[in-house]
Amino acid sequence: MSEKTIFQKIIDREIPAPLVYEDELVAAFHDIHPQAPTHILIVPKKVIPRVGEATPEDQATLGALLLAAGHIAEKLGFKDRSHGFRLVINHGKDAGETVPHLHVHLLAGRALDWPPG
Ligand code: AMP
């Protein structure tokens, strides 16, 4: 079996990281190198390496990631349009992917540039 990803170790509680959200399908915790005042990673408990490798079987998990993002944004007060938040998924090297375990970045707490760098 291949070695666990860092995110799988966090989900399995082998590496300590307080969870800001958890349900049957996903867990969320703070990014260790935040790029905004709030930077949370939402991660499926099932290891899907990257979004382009998800299969129709993963439909519920993919939906759960976005629903969790909405719950977390609401809980932290970013859901109203005057504040807001950004979700990012990096697939592959050019996009900046560094951890091969699908994750959604939730960024909030400052005005974010567009287009991204
Ligand atoms: P990506 O570049 O899209 O693959 O994002 C990976 C993210 O994981 C980066 O923003 C890292 O800062 C973050 N990261 C790496 N290791 C940890 C960790 N142990 N706990 C929390 N976040 C981490």
Image (cartoon, helix red, strand yellow):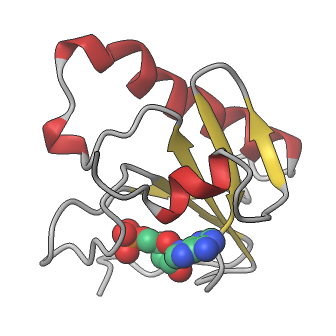
Q: Is residue 115 above or below residue 66?
A: below
Residue 112 is at least partly visible in this image: no
Location of residue 41 by image quarter: bottom right
Tally of numbered discs: 0
Classify residue 41 as left or right of residue 109.
left
Residue 9 is at least partly visible in this image: yes
Q: Is residue 79 above or below residue 98?
A: above
Q: Tell me residue 26's x, y (percent).
A: 59, 33
Query: Which of 27/68 is in front?
Result: 27
Residue drawn at point x = 53 percent, y = 57 percent: 7
Residue drawn at point x = 44 percent, y = 52 percent: 103
Location of residue 37 by image quarter: bottom right
Residue drawn at point x = 72 percent, y = 56 percent: 82
Q: Tell me residue 88's x, y (percent).
A: 41, 59
Classify residue 77 as left or right of residue 72.
right
**Which quarter of the rendered picture does the N terminus lie within?**
top left
Query: Which of 82/50 is in front?
Result: 50
Q: Is residue 33 above or below residue 100?
A: below
